[in-house]
Amino acid sequence: MGLTTSPLVSGGQWTDDHSARHASLLHRLLDIGELLMASGAEVNRVEDTLTRMGKAYGASHMNVFVITTSIVVTMIFPDGTERTQTRRIRNGGSTDFTLLEDLNALSRRCCANPLPVEDLKEKIEEIRARKHSDLLYYVGNVVGAGSFTAFFAGTLPDIIAASILGLLVSAMRKRLGKITPTPVIDNFVGSFLTGCLLGGTVQALPFLHMDAIIIGEVMLFVPGIAMTNAVRDVLSGDTMAGMMRLLESLLWTVALACGFMASLALINMLS
């Protein structure tokens, strides 16, 4: 009895071409999911985006599982072919609304009129390589630090000092983010150095009020959006992902508090 081979499982050119295209498409979807997580998107948004895009590209069914550290996607095609890929997420602790907006626009475009996989790859790389204005980053930190100091009854000198320190802190954090291995260490080292800088400033200018200024600087570190997304994930049914994100946020907050307390203790010992 002769053996017959299906084109879906044989080593033929037809199967190889389709398998390669399916793998490439799935890889591009994981790229988008990773960038969405890196820009601060909530888990439900990532799962919904990948599901809609996968179906727009011909999948009959999509199984997408996302947590803060991993994405698993299985695409099932009308011919019965299944493809699964996993992506480890290592940079999901930041927030970038510009990147998020660009990815949302790309996903909506692909759902309405799917791009060829090669063009989709180019668009993703273009978005990934797009540079954002450092000026806006520094201005945001300066305005944020000064505004919170004013809100908590800081005087005009306090507001000016907090704004200047906010500029220095934002420049310091940009460099720390490149050398610290985790957000927890980044928050601890950043808050410790900020506390030392603030303590030295208040020692040199005793008319400043440390309590008002330190609140303005703390707000530059607090992971407020991450905490909000964690609660939203829990309420939308993604309990495990939400609890993991909430635990991460709490660890960042504890590291932040420990850094400031250590710096203040050091300043008190030296004064």
Image (cartoon, grey):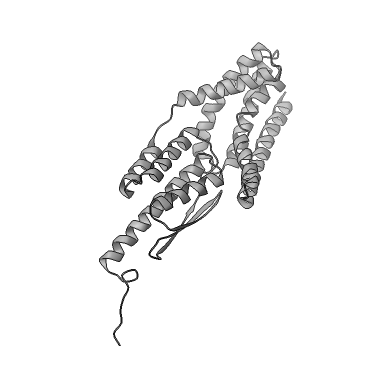
Image quadrant assignment for residue 102:
top left
Q: How many marks?
A: 0
Q: Would you say residue 190 is visible in this rendering? A: yes
Q: Position of residue 123 (x, y in %)?
A: 35, 41
Q: Would you say residue 90 is visible in this rendering? A: no
- Residue at the location (30% across, 65% down)? 15
Q: Quadrant of the C terminus?
A: top right
Give the left or right position of residue 227, taking residue 19 as reference.
Answer: right
Q: Position of residue 186 (x, y in %)?
A: 58, 38
Q: Quadrant of the N terminus?
A: bottom left
- Between residues 270 and 68, which one lies in front from this camera angle? 68
Q: Position of residue 49 (x, y in %)?
A: 48, 46
Give the left or right position of residue 163, taking residue 57 as reference.
Answer: right
- Between residues 201 and 219, which one lies in front from this camera angle? 219
- Between residues 76 and 160, which one lies in front from this camera angle? 76
Q: Position of residue 83 (x, y in %)?
A: 42, 61
Tell which residue pokes out farthest to the left in this image: 13
Can you say whether 16 is above or below 148 in the image? below
- Residue at the location (73% across, 26% down)? 268
- Between residues 135 and 211, which one lies in front from this camera angle? 135
- Residue at the location (33% across, 57% down)? 21
